[in-house]
Amino acid sequence: MEIIESVNDGLKRELKVVIPASELENRLSGRLAELKGQVRLNGFRPGKVPESYLRKTYGRSVMAEVVQETVTETSQKALDDRSEKPAFQPEIAFTEDTDEIENVMAGNADLSFTMAFEVIPPIDLMDFSKLSLEKQVCEATDTHIDEALERIASSQRDFEAKDGKAESGDRATIDFVGRIDGEEFEGGSAQDAPLELGSNSFIPGFEDQLIGTSAGDEVEVNVTFPEDYGAAEFAGKDAVFSVTVKEIASPSEVSIDDEFAARLGMEDLAKLREAVKEQVEGEFEQVSKSKLKRALLDELDQAHTLDLPSKLVEQEFEQVWNQVTQEMEKASRTFEDEDTTEDEARAEYQTIAERRVRLGLVLGAVGESNDISVAEDELNRGLMERLRQFPGQEKEVYDFYQKNPQALAEIRAPIFEQKVVDFITELASVTETTVDREELYRDPDEDEESGSDSDK
């Protein structure tokens, strides 16, 4: 085997690999010898089929297998012999000369092909012990617990029919038929539909027009679908709903006491408060860890400057861009609606793609240099969490992931990333700062946007 490096430009590499015809012949002869003891042909005793007959009958198909296996083995060996690591699976290209291909298949010419790829750049990792990070923490107060209990109680309350007019907070049971331009539309009709007034669970303005109605009333409700409505065919359109109010029911008061706790399977109210406190603390900790991770990734992004494999960036950008444009199309929105242009949006998402690739390479280097990997039991737990998102379809989803290594890799990737982040965080200097709930939940991007606006 001969390997010739034809391109070495930045991260780009191209190798020409030449396999002598004699090596292909040796491999072909070996395969035919194996085949000789396996085939059963009329007129020949087992194992006595002449090689010339096998070559004539099966030679081309066996040579095709030999070429495929040879390319796989030699391309991998060519990479193993180099100290560089490809950023992606090399692109293999053969000659387009059909005569040359025929000569190779006939065993009369050397096999040659090219391998084009980009290499992972050398990464000089920073000293993580010099990282200084702030972790925002928030204490779960009695107020937080009381508010959580009120939300639970609100979801558990019963409704009792009343004779009076509907008020905000009441539940109206209605029949309705919706029309756009006088025509009924799919999904615009229902019977005995319960609707809690003031819940904002229906089209904006719909619930407000039912306040003051009574059981037996028939009303027409005029609304306009939001511009960002999920179903693009309805977005921004006016609709009229013919509504029959069948019942008005008011919510019953729910006392948050030992009896209420027992209904939820708890020993008493004190135990319920303990459980709710743990839940609130868990939610706060999740947000806290998420913001700490964001801050860490920002530091890593700023601290590492490296050339990026162009194809990885291109693939990441296409993935992000496709998702963005599909969501905009679904919502019937344009770049102008977003107060930007397509060119500006492309530039923004190009930067995001570069950041993701850069951080992916840095985290990968940290994991590789510190023997961080995802254990089988960790991957299985991640898979089980994914299965729980598809109740009733667990077996089908499980089989899908078992048959698709790439899909399984999508479960492994975030687990690996979090393990690396935890590893770096342990080495960094982390200072805890107590903040209130509003500050904990504040999006740093909103601060940046408001700052940018004030600078204009």
Image (tube, grey):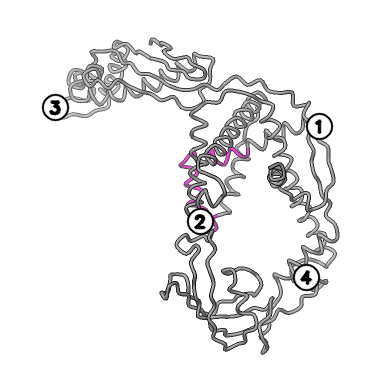
For mark 3, what is the residue?
43
Task: Work out how far the residue at label 4 is from the one at label 3, CA to CA, in angstroms.
Answer: 85 Å
Q: How busy is the neighbourhood of tag 3: few (under 14 within 10 Å), some, or many (20 plus)? A: few
The N terminus - image quarter: top left
Spatial CA span between label 3 and label 1: 81 Å
- Residue type at tag 2: Ala
Label 1: how many Cα within 10 Å (few below 14, some 14–19, many 20+): some
Dot 3: what SS? loop
In the image: residue 70, left or right of residue 260:
left
> Where does the magenta region start and end?
390-415
Residue under label 4: 262
Q: Is residue 189 left or right of residue 56?
A: right
Residue hosting label 2: 331
Identify the element where label 2 is drawn: loop
| Labels 3 and 1: the sequence-earlier one | 3
> Mark 2 or 1 closer to N-term?
2
Q: Where 270 falls versus 11 (above or below)?
A: below
Q: Amino acid at mark 4?
A: Ala
